Amino acid sequence: MRWYRELPHSSDALMEAYGRTLAEAFANAARAMMSVMLDVRRVRGSVEGSCELEGEDAEGLLYGWLECVLDRFQVERVAYARFSVDLDEGRWRLRASMRGEPYDPSRHGMGREVKAVTYHMMYVGECGGLRCVRFLLDL
């Protein structure tokens, strides 16, 4: 089974990611977002990163998480492809570790540029017995 997919959208990237747990769905959401920008299969894990944040609800936490990953790519130029997420759903806290390497367009390819994560069409819930998140990336 694929743990994420891109859904049809006229101008942006509408992504859906799945997991047995919400934490796993969040990890797969980050990989899905990175797959829009580069070939995640070619990323090695020589660089470690982390992210800790809180949200007011599940959607706010998903938004903040994806923004953290996108920011690391845009500012630090690190291509992350492996994510481990720990969630406290009662307090909407996230602690994540990420593995990747410095971005190299000749190695990782040049996908579509993601300008921003949006709340538009965002969904956190269940899809077919799995935890599921859906989000729109502004291209």
Image: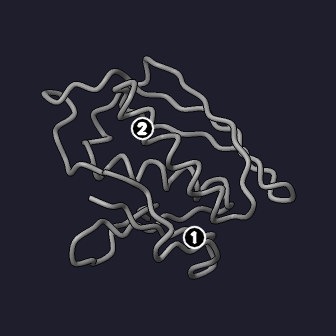
Query: Residue 39 appears at what percent x and percent y?
Result: 25, 42
Q: Residue at x 22, y 78 (%)?
A: 10
Query: Residue 18 appears at what percent x and percent y?
Result: 53, 65
Query: Residue 90 appears at what percent x and percent y?
Result: 86, 59
Image quarter of the C terminus: bottom left
Seen in the picture, residue 74 relative to 86 is either above or below; the reply is above
Nearer the observer, 113 or 31: 113
Classify mark 2: residues with Cα within 10 Å, few (<14), some (14-19) or many (20+). many
Seen in the picture, residue 34 relative to 105 is either above or below; the reply is below
Q: Residue at x 22, y 25 (%)?
A: 104
Q: Find residue 118 and report its image quarter.
A: bottom left
Element on which disc 2 rests = strand
Seen in the picture, residue 71 relative to 63 is either above or below; the reply is above
Give the numbered dot on residue 132. Answer: 1
Query: Residue 113 appears at what percent x and percent y?
Result: 24, 48
What residue did someone put label 2 on? 81
Q: Residue at x 57, y 70 (%)?
A: 132
Element on which disc 1 rests = strand
**Which residue type does callout 2 highlight?**
Ala
Disc tally is: 2
**Which residue type does callout 1 highlight?**
Cys
Nearer the observer, 123 or 116: 116
Classify mark 1: residues with Cα within 10 Å, few (<14), some (14-19) or many (20+). many
Seen in the picture, residue 27 relative to 16 is either above or below; the reply is above
